[in-house]
Amino acid sequence: LRLMIIPRKPERFDEVAEQIRNSGLAFERYSRIKSQNLELTEKCPVILGDTMGDLRKFYCLASGPVFVGRTLAPMGGSDMMEPAALGKCVIFGPHSFNFRQTVEALLEGGGALEVKDERQLFDTIRRCLNEPDYARRIADKGREVIRRNQGATVRTVEAIEALLTKR
């Protein structure tokens, strides 16, 4: 089991590295893994995603649940559409106001899990790891929600064009 932490902004890479170091956990920077083509040992439980443009790779590598960060604090989180579309069991906190439509669609379709706090996050991740069939059902529903909603941009443009041609 590995924890992958991917800060949203490059200016936080060093700060997050320091936080991981201060926690006492061994970690490796993805930039080093990538540039030196390193093989990881079991003694490296944390990977710091300190590159840009590789988030999709991290989502693809995830064999367990994906927690969408920044959602436990009132900062607004990252988009959970991509991990859901990739068939990952998505978990997020209550502060996802900047992706409300996606959140509502995923929750309504049973395709994601919302937690209220750190304790509930811990319990939810533990359940997903201990009950892989449960996590797989959530992931499958999430992927289906995204699949059902594909093409929204095209439909929106068509609706606007229809309104404009009526004038």
Image: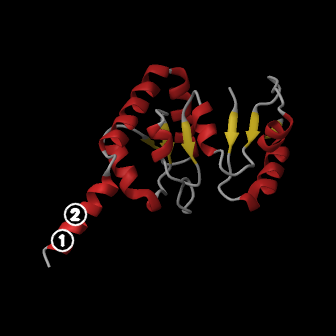
- Residue lying at 20% horizontally and 74% vertically, measured from the top left: 164
- Residue lying at 58% horizontally and 33% vertically, measured from the top left: 60
Asked which quadrant contains residue 134, the reply is top left
Of the residues shown, which amino acid type is indicated by label 1?
Answer: Leu
Q: Are marks 1 and 2 in contact (CB under 8 Å)?
A: yes
Q: Quadrant of the N terminus?
A: top right
Residue 43 at x, y percent in the picture: 83, 26
- Residue lying at 32% horizontally and 49% vertically, measured from the top left: 151
Q: Label 2's element?
A: helix
- Choose between 63 and 95: the one closer to the eye: 63
Residue 159 at x, y percent in the picture: 22, 63
Residue 112 at x, y percent in the picture: 42, 40
Q: Is residue 16 left or right of residue 59?
A: right
Disc 2 target residue? 159
Q: Label 1's element?
A: helix
Query: Dot 1, how many residues are within 10 Å of its Cα: few (below 14), some (14-19), or many (20+)?
Result: few
Q: Quadrant of the C terminus?
A: bottom left
Disc 1 target residue? 163
Q: Is residue 10 left or right of residue 24?
A: left
Label 1 and label 2: CA atoms lie apart by: 6 Å
Residue sitting farthest toward the left? 166
Query: Dot 2, how many residues are within 10 Å of its Cα: few (below 14), some (14-19), or many (20+)?
Result: few
Residue sitting farthest toward the bottom? 167
Residue 147 is marked as none
